[in-house]
Image (spheres, rainbow, N blue to C red):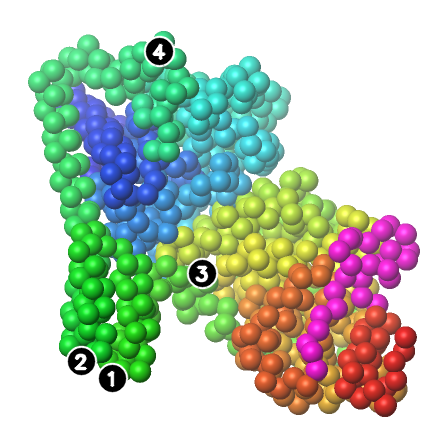
Amino acid sequence: MTEAQTKTEITFEDFKAEVLNDYRIARVSRECSLLGRKEVLTGKAKFGIFGDGKEVPQLAMAKAFQNGDFRSGYYRDQTFMMAIGQLTIEQFFAGLYGHTDLAHDPMSAGRQMGGHFATHSLDENGHWNNLTQQKNSSADISPTAGQMPRLLGLAQASKIYRNVRGLEDFTKFSNQGNEVAWGTIGNASTSEGLFFETINAAGVLQVPMVMSVWDDEYGISVHARYQTTKENISEILKGFQRDADNNGYEIMTVKGWDYPALVETYQKASAIAREEHVPVLIHVRELTQPQGHSTSGSHERYKNADRLAWEAEFDCLAQMRHWLLDNNLATTEELDTIDNEAKKEVLEGKKAAWIAFVSPIKAEQNELVALLHAIAETSANKVFIEQYASALAAIKEPIRKDILTTARKVLRMIVKENGQSQLATWITNYTNKIQPKFSSHLFSQSDKAVLGAAAVAPTYDETAEEVDARLVLRDNFDAIFNKYPESLIFGEDSGNIGDVNQGLEGMQEKYGELRVADAGIREATILGQGIGMAMRGLRPIAEIQYLDYLLYAIQIMSDDLATLQYRTHGRQKAPLIIRTRGHRLEGVWHSGSPMGMIINAIRGIHVLVPRNMTKAAGFYNTLLETDEPALVVECLNGYRLKEKMPTNLGEFKTPIGVVETIKEGNDITIVSYGSTLRIVEQASKELLEIGIDVEIIDAQSLLPFDVNHDCVKSIAKTNRLLVVDEDVPGGASAYLLQQIIDEQNSYRYLDSQPQTLASKAHRPAYGTDGDYFSKPSAEDIFEKVYAIMHEAKPEQYPSLY
């Protein structure tokens, strides 16, 4: 694919060649859409959502897009990707077929639907490429407007690189902050809250962002009059327009079929954003969608005859063709030749992509068929095995499910025969080969992966006095900001007052407002800032003030951050640290501990639950030496408790995935985490007074949990287990029980039923007693353990009730 180009000084012949090349790219893209739809309707692909009708504005955008820039976009941007040289015809169809080979589908290796585009920020070892020497696209996600928060961070990174000292050596990530972040979205998706939150935040922050709204008047089948006030997003955003006295946006509107006006508009937008660091909104109107929303329906069902006729006339390719002819830039014959060549090129590319997709599967099919025939020769079930082999061989376009299902069914027949071990070995080897194609890279597989980080214990002076624990955090952050010039932190109240618990006291004054920053009340885009900046080589810490408020950002964490490494097959990463605080406070909205929801929504992000601030500081130190995202939940009631001040601030590291035994015992193992551990410790002292010796294990991290399987080693000694947690019943305590019982097989050592003790299903009421009657108390733990021991030794521990 030839990239779209714009030269500063060109001859007429150069100009003519350039615009004809643009037209050729657009025609190729349109043919891909048309043929792609047919591939879905004939069953070779499962679903198609294409960029037809949006080709010409995307050409204009591509002309303004420079090396180092980033796109955070919409699943219809195929023409743009072709125009910047990052998508070929074969790759387009490989994505449509779901080819699991990254060499064929470099966007996601078959993990996302077609139309979801990405470039490779990382090499095969998970190390950064030079992002300033390539055109970059952050990996798309399907949830509408979900690309917006990340876009904010991608743009803010340029502001940081331009204005923060100490980043001069980060030349593979930025050229003095001159990069623009380009966003694209459909007009209907501007109704989403994430769009408005991001637009507002970018206007406040004044970052180099160009936001394109592709407006074809519909959102699936729903007209704009049901989507947007005044049916016009640029009209209702006029208040964001900057003026002589106020910062804001530059807002532009342009018709989506007007090629020269589009090129001029995008060049102007690029210059404003790139040079002035002012955000720009481009409302691209009068676009069409020739095939409707997707392959799941036809737009003839909801567009009337007049609208369909208008779309045929004002299709952007038809209008571009008219413009080329009217301005004597091409003849009808020349354009017909381009059209015909595009059809031929796309057809050949489609065929090549299909052969590349199906050939390895057919080879695997033939391999198993041959093996089954060989096994059948000596089997008592020869007739049935031959039937399975013949049925498999008859499948003209097999999928891997067909192959493995057949093998596993035959294995049942020959479980007592000589061929069993041969087939079982084949199945094991095949599964080990194929399963990673669908499962790898949920977490980093580089040499900076979290589990490769070695623990470093905090050190202390002999005369060290105990201080408020928040000072350990504060002084450790000071060491971090000094050690890592690329690190920064931001959130509600994080800057001027040094966060609500003073863990950042004095840091803004020392390191400046860009590195220690206040943010508006907008959790989703606080997360987005972090994701985008982390994708550009910075090490952001995004602070969510309280754990309950994380719910505002859970969709961004789940759909974008947690899946990033996975959905790019390890070719993009965002090692964002999310800092929050929670547990043990009165009141419905400040006392939630929704850990079960969190750990099941954000697989792909580490969830760390330190019991004190030294442990929390150690987690931050560990994470900054690794390349994976994590959530750190500090204990809300621990900032004023006393801890000793370590001497090796910024250097000691809390290991991730490793539990810690904080009290040894012989009668029962209690596993817990966070603030609840202090309640467990209190109860254990009271239990020891009556002869029950508790072993207490601090989980420390929930994702990953106990990679060394130390819990089962404890249970082998105590033979009893209680998991205590302040999440709702069936939440994190159930998860921990599953990990210990299923994953570690600790049931072998249990003499009593393993149990959990969680909070009530509701959140605590505001009153002083709300916490006591809602979450596990020391008395609850005492009585739960006592009841377990009563069941085992009723004479020694008679029933309390």
For the residues bearing labels 2 and 1, Cβ distance under 8 angstroms: yes
Quick check: 613 above or below 8?
Answer: below
Q: Which is closer to the viewer, label 3 or label 1?
A: 1
- On the image, the x and y values in percent for residue 731 come to 66, 61
Answer whether labels 4 and 2 touch (C-beta < 8 Å).
no
Mark 3 → mark 2, Cα distance in angstroms: 43 Å
Dot 3 or dot 4: first in sequence order is: 4
Residue under label 4, please give it.
305
Highlighted range, magenta: 752-778
Near-viewer residue (399 or 312)? 399
User: Mark 3: few, some, or many residues within 10 Å (few <14, many ≥20)?
Assistant: some
For mark 2, give the secondary structure.
Answer: loop
Q: Is residue 772 magenta?
A: yes
**Residue 378: assigned label:** 2
Q: How far is mark 3 from mark 4, CA to CA?
A: 48 Å
Q: Which residue is mark 1?
A: 418
Can residue 426 be seen here? The reply is yes
Rendered view: 381 above or below 75: below
Magenta stretch: helix, strand or loop mostly: loop
Residue 335 position, x and y percent, is 13, 21
Q: Amino acid at mark 4?
A: Ala
First in sequence: mark 4 or mark 1? Answer: 4
Q: Which of disc 2 and disc 3 is earlier in sequence?
A: 2
Give the Cα separation between the discs numbered 4 and 2. Answer: 68 Å
Residue 151 seen in the figure = no
* Residue that mark 3 sits on: 442
Answer with left or right where residue 407 lies relative to residue 547: left
- Per the image, is 764 magenta? yes
